[in-house]
Image (cartoon, rainbow, N blue to C red):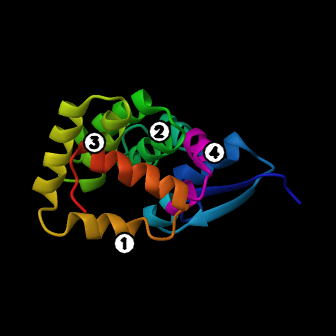
Amino acid sequence: MPALRLAFLGPRGTFTEQAALLYAPDAELIAAPSIADVTQLVIAGQADEAIRVSQRGLRLNAHGLSVWLNLDVLAFSYFVAGRYPEAVEASRRLIEMRPDYLWGYLHLAASFARLDRPDEARSALEEALRVQPDRLSDVIRITLAFGDPTVVERYTEALRKAGLEA
């Protein structure tokens, strides 16, 4: 039985599976059918592995359609791992690629809040509200509902610090 269980954004045969195989050829690979499934694995505490696989996925496929998905996982994983400057950089790259993607702004706002950069955190949160003006707190709560409570609380606390109202 392999010592490492490693999730990748499926289906099998994608660049993300190739990245996972290159990273850990003997690992038990888990195909996650959606970014939400991968995110749930990160929330459950597998951030370091998600970072490594996402980085490798970006190196293997720097211009394909999956780039923004890898950046999303990477930005959130960096946040979960407490690597806030790297989370900011990944979030900015994600926003540059997908300017109307809500989670890029949320990752950016939470990371800036953790870095004690309140003006930038507030600005990123305002952009998130531009993208998702209605019921933003509910969207966040529903998306993160099944995560590790410690991770979810740290993320939502950072967003509250950025100005998110409950």
In the figure, residue 89 lies in which quadrant?
Answer: top left
User: Could you say where residue 85 lies in the image, as x and y percent from the top left?
Assistant: 40, 27
Instruction: Tell me the residue that label 2 is attached to.
Output: 58
From where the camera sits, is residue 119 visible? yes
Front tag of 1 and 4: 1
Label 4 sits on a secondary structure element that is: helix
Instruction: Tell me the residue that label 1 is attached to.
Output: 142
| 69 on left or right of 138 | right
CB under 8 Å between callouts 1 and 4? no
Which numbered marker is on residue 49? Answer: 4
Front tag of 3 and 2: 3
Q: Report, in whole angstroms, how far the alpha carbon at label 1 lies from the one at label 2.
A: 28 Å
Magenta-drawn segment: 40-53
Q: Amino acid at mark 2?
A: Leu
Sequence-wise, which precedes: disc 1 or disc 2? Answer: 2
Label 2 sits on a secondary structure element that is: helix
Question: In percent of the image, x 14 and y 47: which residue is there?
Answer: 127
Instruction: Tell me the residue that label 3 is attached to.
Output: 109
Sequence-wise, which precedes: disc 4 or disc 2? Answer: 4
CB under 8 Å between callouts 3 and 2? no
User: Could you say where residue 16 lies in the image, as x and y percent from the top left?
Assistant: 55, 51
From where the camera sits, is residue 93 visible? no
Sequence-wise, which precedes: disc 3 or disc 1? Answer: 3
Label 3 sits on a secondary structure element that is: helix
Q: Amino acid at mark 3?
A: Ala
Question: In percent of the image, x 48 and y 39: which residue is there?
Answer: 78
Q: Amino acid at mark 1?
A: Ile
